[in-house]
Amino acid sequence: MNIWENKVIFITGANGFLGSHLVKKALYYKAKVIVLIKEDIRSSLFEMENLGNKSRIYRGDLSDSKLINHIFKNNNIDVCFHVAAQAIVGIANNSPIGTFKTNIEGTWNVLEAARVFGVRAMVVASSDKAYGEHKKLPYKEEASLIALHPYDASKSCTDILSRTYAHTYKLPVAVTRCGNIYGPGDLNFSRIIPDTCCSAIKARNPIIRSDGSPIRDYTFINDIGDAYFILAKDLLNKKINFGQAFNFGTGKPISVIKLVNMILKISGNTALVPKVLSKGKIKGEIDKQYLSSVKAKRILGWNPKYPLKKGLEITYKWYKENL
């Protein structure tokens, strides 16, 4: 049974990497899709696959509370996936106010509209960065949110606000804390996987901004898309308590240098040599960070289906065919 058919699903940041995949999945499920995009991005997966042709599009900024209220008031929204954000760590470090306005004020505008005009289920994107830096790894959901960098702090606030609305107003919301997401359609080449794939395709040595030692958990986009819909379904069916946070990751972290070399091996360009730019940690970024997804597996029945090698093979093939 397809529970999503004719459900009204509202997706913020719909032409971003994650947003595009959620739109694509919602359309596949024959939902009625409403999207908010800040500006047209011609190179996005959203545009490349003409996802807007089957969606109702609103254009504007998350900080425009009148627009957000209008969308909720006039569309009888069943499910909201709030994934819009300023997501680049470097930009956040250089422009914290803009990041806070989008990620924090934008989130309270969406939450407040959902509270006032009603929504049956809402999934909000936090991040593993919301935890800040802990010595005890992997991070579990009960770990404190002690972020000390601008992007990380904005996600901590997003996280706390969402859970506050669930606790105080019984809003049917849950929070996702994902590791690094990768896959087809990510055209942000400041990220290590898109940039390395591009370098391999163009036969140039990939650049590593750190010393190569930082450790992260990389999770394939299809697994994350599944996580969002599983979580939304359980909220709709009231199978889980509102206001919970869930980690989504593979639990198999890898260093940057090993990741880059794996991509080069997949590409067949093993003669290429990563160019390491730093002799130490990057200012404003966490050195080691990865998640425990035991709670998601136990409560939601979610398990990642794509091992890193398989996901990278699919991803590299996509870049080779589309760049």
Image (cartoon, grey):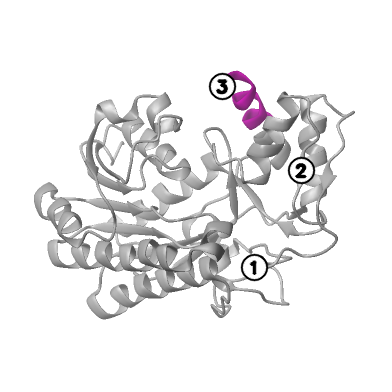
Q: What element carries label 3?
A: helix
Pick the front one: 166 or 37? 37
Three-letter residue code for mark 2: Ile
Residue 322, which numbered label? Answer: 3
By secondary structure, the bulk of the magenta-drawn segment is best described as helix
Circles 3 and 2: CB atoms closer than 8 Å: no
Q: Is residue 295 visible?
A: no
**What kind of element bears circle 1?**
loop
| Towards the viewer: 198 or 255 | 198
Q: Which of 50 and 189 is in front in this view?
A: 189
Quickly name the residue at label 2. 207
Residue 291 figure quarter: bottom right
Residue 223 lies, in percent from the top left, at 54, 44
Count neighbours of disc 2 (C-alpha within 10 A) and say few if under 14, some if 14 to 19, many if 20 or more. Answer: some
Question: In the image, residue 116 lies at what x, y percent?
Answer: 14, 67
Which one is closest to the eye, mark 1 or mark 3? 1
What's the residue type where badge 1 is placed?
Gly
61 over 21 or under it: above or below: below
- Position in image of residue 179 (x %, y %): 60, 56
Residue 257 on the magenta span: no
Q: Is residue 320 magenta?
A: yes
Q: In this view, does 278 lie to the left or right of 139?
A: right
Label 1: which residue? 284
